[in-house]
């Protein structure tokens, strides 16, 4: 006899296998496609289960050597993501710059320094006055 109850893991309700519509993980992208209109990669679904998104994880269970989620768990996941996203939009932005953004800024700064050294660029200081790289005034 298989007995299932809602189990709590790390403060979150887990899938109730007797009441919820189980979906084998490899079929989850097809189920999500019905709502999104596009199919996600299976690796994305696994990442949602293991790493999560913004601190929210998609509930899943392992049974008989396979991993399963449920339609209800996907709905809870979407609701929780929407809630956390709404909270983030209400809070002041604290966006971290990505590695690529920092690298691009460094590259642009280096190019600007080169242009200053070559005399191709003048730095504007104050109102209406231009100074070259040596600090001399043009006007």
Image (tube, rainbow, N blue to C red):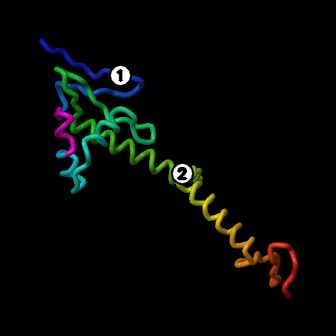
What number is the disc on residue 80? Answer: none
Q: Is residue 26 magenta?
A: yes
Compared with residue 74, is residue 130 higher up or lower down, i.e. above or below?
below
In this orientation, which residue lies closer to the viewer: 73 or 126?
Answer: 126
In this orientation, which residue lies closer to the viewer: 98 or 114?
Answer: 114
The magenta stretch is: 21-29
**Residue at the right extreme, as displayed:** 136
Q: Quadrant of residue 115?
A: bottom right
Name the residue located 68 percent from the left edge and 69 percent from the top edge: 112
Compared with residue 139, is residue 105 higher up or lower down, i.e. above or below?
above
Of the numbered discs 1 and 2, the one sitting upstream in the chain is 1
What number is the disc on residue 98? Answer: 2
Tag 1 residue = 8
Left or right of residue 125, residue 57 in this image: left
Name the residue located 28 percent from the left edge and 22 percent from the top edge: 6
Query: Judging from the image, what secondary structure is the residue with disc 1 in?
Result: strand
């Amino acid at each position: 006899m298989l007995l299932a109850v809602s189990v709590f893991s790390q403060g979150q309700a887990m899938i109730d296998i007797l009441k919820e519509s189980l979906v084998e993980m490899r079929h989850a992208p097809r189920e999500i496609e019905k709502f999104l209109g596009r199919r996600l990669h299976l690796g994305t679904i696994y990442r949602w289960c293991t790493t999560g998104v913004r601190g929210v994880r998609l509930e899943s269970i392992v049974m008989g050597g396979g991993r399963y989620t449920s339609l209800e768990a996907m709905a809870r996941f979407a609701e929780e993501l929407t809630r956390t996203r709404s909270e983030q939009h209400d809070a002041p932005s604290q966006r971290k710059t990505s590695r690529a953004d920092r690298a691009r800024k460094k590259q642009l700064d280096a190019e600007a320094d080169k242009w200053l050294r070559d005399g191709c660029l003048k730095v504007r200081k104050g109102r209406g006055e231009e100074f070259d790289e040596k600090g001399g005034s043009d006007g």
